Every structure is written in C-alpha cells, then in structure tokens.
DNA sequence: GCCGTTTTCGGCCCGACTGTTTTCAGTCG
C-alpha cells in the first residue's frame, strides 16, 4: 500500500516537535510544520507526484531541501534527520508538548532537571511535588500540570474521527480490490461518526476462498499483527492505530454490519426486542429457531423485529429504538442540504485562499452563498482586521457580488468576544455587515458564571448573529470551557441569534448532545467549516456527521436555508 | 527551512496573559 500523505506529514510534524525541544531556529521549525500541513491537506498523492517526477518544490513552502526529504520519506518511509533527532531526544518526551501549558522550554527543563520522559512520569513528578522545585516552576504550574496530565491519560488512545476517516479510506479501497471481495465498508464508531475513534472496525463481504485476510495482514501499512484467523484479523498500523477486520459471506452482510457498527448498547436493546418476539439476532442474521429469516441487509434485520431502518449515527440507545417503533425517527440532515457556509477566512486574516478562490471553491460545491468572516484585531497573531481593513473588504465584496450571478458573498466577521463580553469592533463597522459571528479565543479558563455572563453580554449586542465554536474545546488538547450552554441557548432563542457547529476536525464544537439541546430550545444550528483554505470545505462532512448524531434535521440547520430564507433570519438579529 | 529579491541574505509572528519574577520568560491563539 502507498505511503500516505498523512504519514509524510507525520514525519515532518515529528521533526518539528523534536527540533522545538532542541531549541532550533523557530522559523526552521515553522517550515517543517508548514510543510506537514501543506502535504496533509493536499488533494493529490505526494507519492504519485514523486513517481511521475513532478516538481515538489512548486508546492507552497516546499523548497529544494524539503522536496528531497519528501522523496526520501516516500522511498524509505522515514528520513535521516528524523533518525538523528530520535537518538538525541528520548521517545515520549515530544509527547509532553501535548500537555496544555507545556511548550518546548518547559519540556526541556522537565526532562533535564527531573529526567521526565513520559506523561505518566510527569504526572507522578507533579504528584510528588518535584515539579515546583525547578526554577521557573511554581505551585500553580505544578497543579496545572497535575490536572492536565490526569485528563490526558484518560482518553489518550482515541483518535479524532477526521484522522480515523482518512486512515480508513485507503484501507477500504485496497480491501475492495482483493479478488473475491464484494464490498468493503467501515463499521464501529467511525460509521456512527463518533467524534473520536478507538479502533477502526472494517467489514468485507467476500467469497469463502478470498485472500482478504492474508492481503490485509501483509500490507505495508501494518506494523504488528495482533490476531489473524479465517474471518477476522487485528493489526496495528505503522501510525499506531489498531484496525479490526471482519470478513463475512454476503448473505450475512447486513447482520454483520449492524453487529459490528454497534453501539453495544444499541445491539443489546435490539436483541432484547428480538427475544420478546422469540427471535435471535447475531452477526450472521435473525433466526427463528434454526431458520434464518433475515440478515442480508440491515433493513431486513430491523424489519424482522418490527422497526424501520435506523441511521448509524443514532445507534446509541438514546431513544432511537423507541422512536423507530413509533415511526417518529428524524430525517437527518445531509451534506447536500447545505446551501452555504457562514464561517470562512481568507488570506486577509489567517486563511490561505484569496476572496475570489474561496468564493469559487464554495460555488463549485454547489453553495449559493458564503460568509467571509475574518478574525478581528484582537487576534493579532491571526492578522485580525481593524475597522479600516474590514471596511475595505466590505467594499471588495460589494464589487465582487456585482460581478457574480447566482452566488453571493455575505459580509461578516469573526469578532472576538473580549473578557468583559464586549465585542472587539465598534457598532459603526459591525452595522455594515450581513452577519456578526462572535467567538471566544481568550480566557477559556474563566469560572462558569463569569464565562456564561461574558457570552450572554456579547449576545446582547444588537449586531450579534452567531456564536462560533461555543465551548472552545479542542479534541485531545483542550477541554470545553465552563459555560452554561442551556442558558446561552435560551438567550439565543430570545435574541433570535444562532449557535455554530464548527466542523473543524479538532473542534466539532457543539457536541452531539448539545445539538439536541439546541434543537429542543428552538435554536438553529449553523454547520460551518471555519475554512482557512478551499480544501477545508471537506470538513463539513464531519460537521454533518456530528449534527446527525445530534438528531438534527434540515429544518434545524441555519445554513440549509436558501439565501432568500436566510436573509430575514440574519436581519432579525441585526436590528 | 522557505522566499524573494534592490539576486544571495535578511525577514519570517505578535499581543496578551500567567506565574514567576523584581523586570521577564514561557505559552497560547
């Protein structure tokens, strides 16, 4: 199997991490990170480009040196620089960078002064009070480290769904091409679109003599084979992800898919229903006595127990079985329902595409509108705009809109909600916009009452339209801030404004249960990419998955509205 | 390490906060 772009990106990311701990030139480090991002987001296979002899240094941020290193990684799977760095920095130390509050300097100090090499050891050192003995570390830092490492240990094995989905794609393609394989699909939490995935569960329908398992365990991506039999195999990929593969005959495909999709709680509830009807469900089908009465499709299994088909995203035993029984399952929102995107950046702030390029990309996806929402001045690092620059962009958008037919750019801003709940830009400029997306980027550590009051005050602004990434959480990196979401949602309903489901893979903020809460409170959810390049529109698929887990239907989604329907909804908040 | 030149070396990412200081280093977004 090919060297994935993601693997090359991982090599460069690791190099950057290790260089950082060594205290290398920050711009050199940045070059490696930038290259990792470019390659990770590239729509084409870098390996294929190397094979064709394409000029890699034509890619932005890739020069002669990095192009050569890419070639090296494609050929050998690694590169000499990484090998050298790994010898100099013990394994695990780079992991310490993931602990919130720890950067390269502190990691180096912890390693040199205390010999700490793993998050586990760091946790113990903090518990034993050794961290605060290092110069520059005090009791508060030690306490913060203690809490952060405790949280980190909790879910360290799960990967974000964006990563899992990307890993699954080439595996499924390879499996489907094995002789005798009829169909290869994802199951498990990936198919249920959970925001993080522990193991990848893959299912292949194949004839009995198909060499699916053999090909799978001998593929280049596999680092370790944990188990391998005639119908299932478990392996660990080079990236560390565990993959469980099941092979099933096609007559049992539906039952197997249902079984391995789960969730466990959903399956148990289903089997209980079947028992009442004197039926038995397992991964091979639905049985009455010895007679197999269903199982080739999932629909047939549900039908056999008197239920309509339940979408995978709902299969959590959170009321979906009762809803199916009563025929009141939601008709879940789909990617194709989205008519536009209300949170997007261009290179005017920290995005990478031009206004025109982002508009073209949105249009290409069949969108009717796109809101341009740069950061505001407070976020200086992201080149946030001040009123003067924003006014210029407004004029540019007006001119651009005059040239376009059937597509509209909306004038917006992702304005910072300051510590006291005021907005980072004056009303005089906000009133010229079609929508104002408000976001918290600082002081995510405020106590619940203060954080809530801060956001409520921001919503009091007559121009406030949409609350971006409402909890600020970053998967595996930063927990959600303390905030009373119910209170915020009720305020949003009262003010006629909206909340966002930010579809960035590391955010997916709101969580599924909060989507349900928004729906219950009558607050429309905007599913936005927060795109910083044209490729980021792909993230919307993840947002849709999350929304579906939150039982959202087309009618619950703000940007599933046509422009004509959207305008008055935005206007209502702007008066 | 890349880039863009006034073509071969200097600029690239900056403001605010926190905790630890006694004037600032480290981290974050």
Image (spheres, coloured by chain):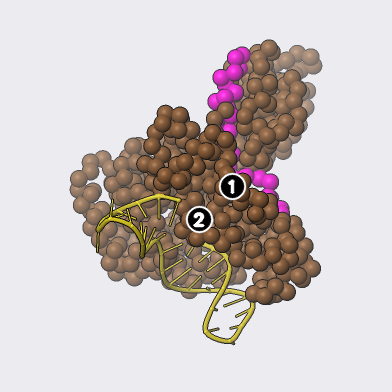
User: Which percent across, then down, holds residue A396?
Assistant: 24, 55
Residue nearest the viewer, comparing A84 with A534: A84
Q: Main secondary structure of the magenta part?
A: helix
User: Which percent across, then down, holds residue A113?
Assistant: 71, 67
**In this view, the mark in front (1 or 2):** 1
Is A166 within the magenta?
Answer: yes
Residue A29's disc is 2
Task: Please determine whether, in this image, residue A134 is positioned above or below residue A555.
Answer: below
Colour assigned to chain A in the rendering is brown
Q: Quadrant of residue A434?
A: bottom left
Left or right, residue A373 beside residue A298 = left
The N terminus of chain A: image quadrant: top right
Q: Secondary structure at mark 2?
A: helix
Which chain does the residue under circle 2 lie in? A
Left or right, residue A369 beside residue A97 = left
User: Which percent across, then down, holds residue A477?
Assistant: 60, 56
Task: Please determine whether, in this image, residue A369 is positioned above or below residue A445.
Answer: above
For the point 64% across and 63% down, the residue is A108
Q: Earlier in the sequence, mark 1 or mark 2?
A: 2
Q: Quadrant of residue A272?
A: top right
Tag 1 and tag 2 share a subunit: yes
Label 1, on which residue? A82
Which chain does the residue under circle 1 lie in? A
Dot 1 surroundings within 10 Å: few (below 14), some, or many (20 or more)? some
Query: Which segment did they paint magenta?
Result: A153-181
């Amino acid at each position: 199997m090919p060297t994935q772009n993601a693997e090359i990106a991982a090599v460069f990311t690791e190099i950057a991490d290790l260089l950082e701990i060594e205290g290398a030139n920050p711009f050199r480090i940045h070059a490696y990170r930038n290259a990792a991002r470019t390659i990770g987001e590239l729509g084409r296979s870098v390996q294929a480009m190397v094979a064709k002899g394409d000029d890699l240094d034509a890619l932005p941020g890739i020069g002669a040196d990095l192009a050569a290193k890419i070639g090296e990684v494609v050929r050998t799977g690694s590169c000499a620089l990484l090998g050298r760095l790994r010898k100099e920095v013990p394994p695990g130390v780079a992991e310490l960078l993931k602990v919130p509050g720890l950067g390269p300097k502190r990691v180096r100090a912890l390693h040199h002064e205390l010999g700490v090499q793993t998050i586990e050891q760091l946790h113990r050192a903090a518990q034993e009070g050794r961290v605060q003995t290092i110069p520059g570390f005090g009791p508060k830092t030690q306490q913060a480290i203690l809490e952060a490492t405790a949280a980190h240990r909790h879910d360290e094995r799960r990967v974000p769904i964006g990563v899992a989905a990307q890993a699954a794609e080439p595996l499924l393609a390879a499996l489907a091409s094995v002789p005798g394989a009829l169909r290869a699909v994802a199951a498990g939490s990936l198919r249920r679109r959970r925001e993080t995935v522990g193991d990848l569960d893959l299912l292949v329908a194949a004839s009995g003599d198909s060499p699916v398992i053999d090909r799978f365990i001998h593929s280049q991506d596999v680092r370790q084979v944990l188990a391998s039999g005639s119908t299932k195999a478990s392996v660990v990929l080079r990236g560390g992800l565990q993959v469980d593969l099941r092979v099933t005959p096609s007559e049992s495909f539906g039952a197997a898919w249902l079984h391995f999709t789960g969730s466990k709680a959903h399956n148990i509830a289903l089997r209980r229903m079947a028992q009442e009807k004197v039926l038995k469900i397992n991964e091979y089908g639905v049985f009455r006595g010895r007679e197999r009465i269903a199982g080739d499709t999932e629909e047939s299994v549900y039908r056999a127990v008197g239920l309509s088909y339940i979408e995978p995203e709902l299969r959590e035993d959170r009321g979906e079985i009762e809803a199916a029984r009563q025929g009141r399952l939601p008709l879940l929102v789909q990617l194709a329902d989205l008519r536009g995107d209300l949170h997007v950046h261009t290179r005017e702030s920290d995005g990478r595409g031009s206004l025109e390029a982002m508009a073209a990309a949105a249009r290409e996806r069949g969108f009717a509108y796109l809101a341009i929402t740069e950061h505001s001045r407070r976020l200086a690092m992201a080149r946030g705009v001040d009123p003067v620059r924003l006014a210029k962009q407004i004029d540019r958008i007006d001119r651009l809109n005059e040239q376009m037919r059937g597509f509209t750019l909306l004038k917006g801003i992702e304005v910072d909600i300051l510590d006291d709940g005021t907005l980072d830009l004056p009303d005089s400029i906000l009133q010229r916009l079609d929508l104002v997306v408000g976001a918290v980027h600082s002081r995510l550590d405020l106590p619940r009452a203060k954080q809530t009051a801060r956001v409520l005050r921001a919503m009091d602004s007559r121009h406030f339209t949409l609350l971006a990434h409402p909890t600020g959480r970053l998967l595996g990196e930063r927990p959600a801030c303390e905030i009373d979401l119910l209170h915020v949602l009720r305020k949003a309903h009262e003010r006629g404004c909206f909340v966002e489901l930010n579809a960035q893979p590391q955010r997916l903020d709101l969580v599924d249960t909060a989507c349900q809460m928004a729906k219950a409170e009558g607050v429309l959810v905007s599913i936005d990419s927060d795109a910083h390049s044209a490729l980021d529109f792909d993230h919307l698929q993840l947002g849709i998955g999350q929304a579906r887990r939150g039982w959202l239907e087309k009618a619950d989604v703000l940007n599933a509205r046509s422009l004509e329907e959207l305008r008055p909804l935005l206007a209502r908040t702007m008066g």
